[in-house]
Image: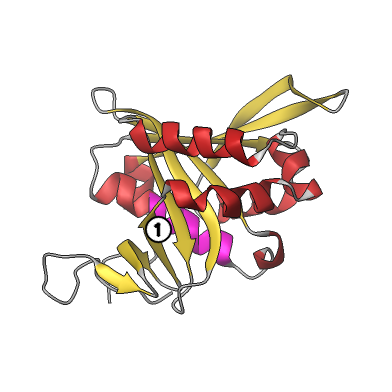
Amino acid sequence: MSADDKTTGDEHGDEEEAGRVVSWRAGSVGLAALDTDDAELLLGWRSDPLIAHHMGIWPRPLSAVRERVERYVDDDERDDFLVLLPDGTPVGHVALTGQNMVDGTAEVELMLAPGERGRGLGTAVLDAVVDLAFGELPMYRLTAETHADNAPALAVLTKSGFTREGTSRAACLHRGRRHDIAVFSLLRPEWDELKRPRAWDA
């Protein structure tokens, strides 16, 4: 994958991409800080039946999603980004949550728009946020969780270098059924050994 530095026109500012400020870029995607006005967009994605199943969520009104996004924006222990294509099209949401700067730990959350799955974007986005966590932030351990039957997510996590640590049995209740949760992690030394370009490599 090819990537650009996160530097911008004036070397100190952020890059403008179709009206959004892109604060981090890697390959085919850019990451722009999530804004409360993105709530309607997230609501549409979260209403997709497959996404709702794999995330274990249920339909919520726009007001509730907007309140949730407002909490995300105000939470100092998380960074949320809208994923943008080069033309500015929003294609997903990615976040580093539960950031503990003392222990150097955080969890990665990723949601792609329904029509964007299966195009390799998941790996590009995950690689980008991992490089941000280890290259710009003092993280040492990243974790990620997904339904144990979410084959695409399992493949993306593995391709990005994550190791499956185990399974939390029957840890999620969604629409009357219990689902196992697969638990993954990636450590800084393992990231150091990955043979791929970093987000800041041309």
Question: Residue 27: percent from the left, percent from the top?
Answer: 41, 72
Q: Residue at x 33, y 41 (%)?
A: 188
Q: Relative to 80, is 41 on the left or the right?
A: right
Where 62 falls versus 198 (above or below)?
above
Q: Relative to 106, is 118 on the left or the right?
A: right
- Judged by its main secondary structure, the magenta piece is helix
Where 139 falls versus 199 (above or below)?
above
Q: Nearer the viewer, residue 30 or 180?
A: 30
Q: What's the image's color scheme? A: secondary structure
Q: Residue at x 52, y 71 (%)?
A: 89
Residue, far front: 63
Specify whether residue 158 is in view. yes
Quarter occupied by residue 189: top left
Specify whether residue 198 is in view. no
Which residue was labeled with disc 1?
128
In magenta segment, residue 4: no
Quarter occupied by residue 121: bottom right
Magenta segment range?
121-129
Q: Secondary structure at mark 1?
A: helix
Q: Relative to 102, is 164 on the left or the right?
A: right
Q: In the rendered image, which quarter contains the N terminus?
A: bottom left
Question: Residue 65: percent from the left, percent from the top?
Answer: 58, 38
Q: Nearer the viewer, residue 144 or 110?
A: 110
Q: Residue at x 54, y 47 (%)?
A: 39
In magenta segment, residue 125: yes
Mark 1 is surrounded, within 10 Å at the Cα level, by few (under 14), some (14 to 19) or many (20 or more) other residues, namely many
Q: Nearer the viewer, residue 55 or 167?
A: 55
Q: Residue at x 11, y 74 (%)?
A: 10
Question: Residue 66: percent from the left, percent from the top?
Answer: 53, 39
Q: In the rendered image, which quarter contains the C terminus?
A: bottom left
Where 15 falls versus 146 (above or below)?
below
Residue type at the position of mark 1: Ala
